[in-house]
Image (cartoon, coloured by chain):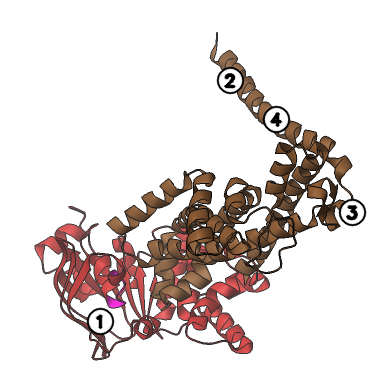
Amino acid sequence: MGTKGKEKIITVLFWFSALIIIAILVGIIGYIVVKGISAISWDFITQPPSRAGKEGGISTTIIGTIYLTLVAMILAVPFGVGAALYLEEYGRKNTRFGYALKLTAETLAGIPSIVYGLFGFVFFVIFLNMGWSILSGGLTLAIMILPTITRTAQEAVIAVPQEYRSNSFALGATKWYTIKRLILPAAAPGIVTGIILSIGRAVGESAAVILTAGSSLGMPLNITDPARTMAVHLYILAMEGISMERAFGTALLIIVLIVIINYLANLSLRKLARQ
Amino acid sequence: MKIKLKSEEVKVFYKDFQALHGIDIDIYENRVTALIGPSGCGKSTFLRTINRLNELIQGTKTEGRIYLDQKDIYSAEIDVVALRKKVGMVFQKPSVFPMSIYENVAYGPKIHGIKNKAQLDSIVEKSLIAANLWQEVKERVHKPAAGLSGGQQQRLVIARVLAVEPEVILMDEPASALDPISTSKLEELIGELKKNYTIVIVTHNMQQAARVSDYTGFFLNGELIEYSKTKELFVNPRDKRTEDYITGRFG
């Protein structure tokens, strides 16, 4: 067979792989939409669940999800980005400490979430006596996503051209000024990507959350209140055979919520970067 | 003629490697001083001792004294930020920041606390005019600087340096990434700038050194071999090594 023929076959094969990926994605989302759309109504979104979720809506779990994710992000983002900035801009390069931190971050990123859940349960819920609460769950999720945020922020900061720094310093800028005005804006898209990935993980997490935030159907008001997130609600609805239709409805809303949160995160952080 | 900068026994070490072996040089005010020599001879390293930029490289040690207006810039009471405000630097590769032309020029003044918009506007315009860029960009100062050509970017970088009102401008092979037309524009600009500034330029290009500078120093293996008026150095080099270099026998 000639070179041209081979090229053609390879092109078709790659095209086919791309097609399969798209088909799977569209298939799953389409299936969830078809199965879940009938459960969704205004009441489903705005009413609290009753009779263990058989009736009513899922409003408390939506609030629980947003609340928990927000707490996790507020805890994890400053520390993650701060650690990345320390490692790349302040700390000495190529030290054992930096290497150890990089290795730790990568190892931590690979630990299954249920292990984090177990740790959070023993440490925050029982040992620190925080009980099943937004706080325990938020702390556990924060620890879980911290490695991802740190590593992506680190990569984003590394990718900022070295010349920006030397030019800025040569103009008399301090490190902090350079970071604030040049490095962070230039690294923002990369950092936002890490944050969005982490939001996705936090919103979708069930195992670690069930062990640390509990599965109460009440409306979480205080940070010390327990809460059930949408993912946990979905799990319980499906596992206990309460209602498959409502489980799919919840799944659909999780996807919608993630899309909305990503959009907002993108928008606000880009705006922040421009200032 | 007033001596603006004076170095005494300047030595620089990168870990175990000694890059400069005691440099003594007088640099005159409102003159262009060119530093020439083959790659790795220490001319750029010396340039970076004048604004203490070498300090940013881990494992670098500098010895000796450099006086700017009779004040030792390596003494403990010197504030590096204030020093770098007085001694600006233009790098080899024009590096515009990912922001508008205006913001690039205003970057430096803002570091030094200028916030007033009218004042910034006037600094930006003045600096762009002084860098011979105003005519080309005045309609689009709020557009991203990345849209400028290479030569324009280098002049923007110079405008950014001028905006902090330095007294000395260090240039590290500023034309090496530019095409011939942009290079001649830059050389013309250097000739204009020396009226108000003291310029030290590192260059690979001997014709350029001959064209733009009043004084020339020849560096080799971390030593200053010869330093004199540019004409003298190129016409009547005293040292055999200088002669070999400028006649193209090595380097």
Check the rendered structure and report the hue given to chain A. brown
- For marks 4 and 3 on the same chain, the one whose residue lies earlier in the sequence: 4
Residue at point 24% right, 57% down? B39
Which label was assigned to residue B27?
1
**Which quarter shows the C terminus of chain B?**
bottom left
In the image, are marks 1 and 4 on the same chain? Answer: no
Which of the 4 image quarters holds residue B115? Answer: bottom right
Residue linked to disc 4? A24
Badge 1: residue crowd in 10 Å (few <14, some 14–19, many ≥20): many
x, y percent for residue B105: 53, 76
Badge 2: residue crowd in 10 Å (few <14, some 14–19, many ≥20): few
Amino acid, disc 4: Ile
Real-space Cα separation, disc 4 to disc 3, in angstroms: 30 Å
Assign a secondary structure to mark 3: helix
Instruction: Report the number of numbered marks.
Output: 4
Residue at point 16% right, 62% down? B220
In the image, are marks 3 and 2 on the same chain? Answer: yes
Name the front one of labels 4 and 3: 3
Residue linked to disc 2? A10
Assign a secondary structure to mark 4: helix
Amino acid, disc 2: Ile
Name the front one of labels 4 and 2: 4
